[in-house]
Image (tube, rainbow, N blue to C red):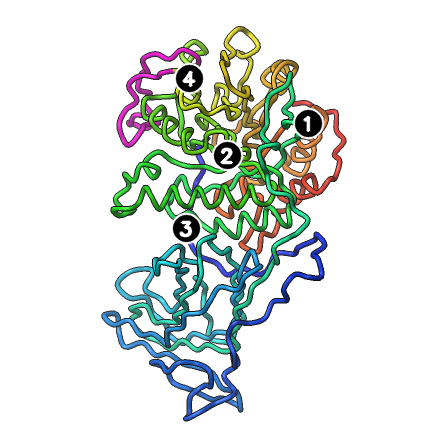
Amino acid sequence: MMHAHTFFACAFTATVLHAAVPLTTPIPVSIFQNGDFEESENNWPKHWPAGDAEYAAENGNHFLRLTSRGADEMVNFFYVKVDVPKGFENLELKFRTRYENVQHGKEKWNDARIIMNFIDQDGKKTGAPPVGFTGTSDWRWIAHKFGVPADAVSLEFMPTHFNTASGTFDIDDVSLAGVDPVRADVKPLGPEATLVVKGNRIVDQAGREEWLQGVNIPSLEWWHEGDHLRESFAAALQDWNVNVIRFAVKTRFWFGRDPKQGPDGAQAYRKLVDEMIEYAAKHGCYIVLDLHEYRAPTQEHAAFWSDAAKRYANHPAVLFDMINEPYDISWEEWRDGGKLAGEKRDGAIAETTEGKELGASIGMQKLLEVIRATGAKNIVIAGGLDWAYDLSGVANGFSLTEKGGNGIMYATHIYPWKTDWAGKVLAVAEKHPIFVGEVGCQPKAMEFEKVIVDPYQWAPDMLAFIQKYKLNWSAWSFHIDASPCVISDWNFTPTPYWGSFVRSALRGAKFDSERVR
């Protein structure tokens, strides 16, 4: 299935943390002193470095104003570098702002903003929190919550006119504080948590059954820096009660082949993937590493898994989803490979790898063997045909052969236009563990949908089906622009038609329906 994505930055506020926090956890205190700018010294706010701004007053209230000098010049309020507070998962920036006649410069990102960079102990940039927001002519509160990279020791803070053509940018009541204290009640995933297949279930090293329930967090398949990754992980783990995150990656970014990545692009991309995996594992959450590509396994995908499987070999938190959505191949080609005919769609070759027509598939069995050759025993996930929906062939002689690993799960992706759940899914669920890797619904039907369903009926029916047969699952998607959306904004507000049902299920709500579509 193809998902439409758009890109823009939005303000977001704190996520509610429902778990009890020990009394010994630190109390959030703003890093900035005199954030309301009311204390002054030599006609400048006390405790703030001198900068290219006007110390203004209006009706007895003091604030800072930055005025654009034109599109060819960037103007900073000031530059502040602060230590990252210890003992917190996230930081939250709050401030009031007001725009007047701010016009973009030569590029669409030339606007009035706050630039922030995390810095590691070697003085190198290790992450940049999202800080975009929309200004208004009236004072408006903005709140941004963002995760802290594991190797960050300090944070640069720079309010600026970023080559804007005109306008004023006012700022007041600034605070930056650590939020979401590190929880003492969460047990990291160690070697004992490594999962293995046992019959049609998965169990840990002590034989305890594990039921994976969570969400998909996309964006690293379309942008090498990701989009709201750290705060999405934090919200999913702390508020939505997930124990698995399906995490999409792409070969061209993994190997640093996108021209926008720069000379160290592959290293930076892999480091980010590493960081998110370790963050999840530290919080007791499994990661399904999803190679978010299509059609059939190729040598390109084998090269990825030869590298990635070695990197995460036998990591207790990581499972391998070999290829996102196979389609337009036979079951023989799915398992054993073969030449792939170019499918014409709107006058162009359909799904390609790195912009080139697919030539031949090596098959799922070979891809599995490539992974096992690295020494990685991690559970492997294999999606079926029809964009990873149809698993019927697995029950009819086309299952994969496992040698020396922790087993195979079979993946299905279920959307409202997919029917015959019993024939395509349940026949395999009797013998093999199932991972519903993508699932979701939305009010607006896709162009190709022949039967329109009511999402407020389909969602509870689907979740009842998952719960009845105890299928492992991850909802699509924990992003505001990759439909069907679980969240409606970067406050992580559940969408009413899908997200509200998902969060209820993840928090333990039971759904009762006998409808199997």
Q: Which mark is residue 369?
A: 4
The mark nearer the N terminus, 2 or 4, is 4
Q: Which residue is mark 3?
A: 7
Q: Is residue 222 above or below residue 13?
A: above
Q: Which residue is mark 1?
A: 209
Q: Quadrant of residue 469?
A: top right
x%, y% of residue 465? 69, 27
The residue sitting at 39% across, 80% down in the picture is 49
Q: How much space separates mark 1 and mark 2, taking CA atoms?
A: 37 Å
Q: Are marks 1 and 2 in contact (CB under 8 Å)?
A: no
x%, y% of residue 445? 54, 36
Q: How much space separates mark 2 and mark 3, taking CA atoms?
A: 21 Å
Mark in the foreground, 3 or 1: 1
Q: How much space separates mark 2 and mark 4, taking CA atoms?
A: 37 Å
Q: Nearer the viewer, residue 189 or 459?
A: 189
x%, y% of residue 232? 53, 49
For label 1, the SS is: loop
The residue sitting at 64% across, 67% down in the picture is 27
Magenta stretch: includes residue 360: yes
For label 2, the SS is: loop
Q: Are marks 2 and 4 in contact (CB under 8 Å)?
A: no
Q: Nearer the viewer, residue 282 or 323?
A: 282
Q: Amino acid at mark 1?
A: Glu
The mark nearer the N terminus, 3 or 1, is 3
The residue sitting at 46% across, 53% down in the picture is 149
Q: Is residue 454 above or below residue 412?
A: below
Mark in the foreground, 2 or 3: 3
Q: How much space separates mark 3 and mark 1, taking CA atoms?
A: 39 Å
Q: Is residue 97 above or below residue 454?
A: below
Q: How much space separates mark 4 and mark 3, taking CA atoms?
A: 37 Å
Magenta segment boundaries in residue numbering: 335-362
Q: Which residue is mark 2?
A: 446
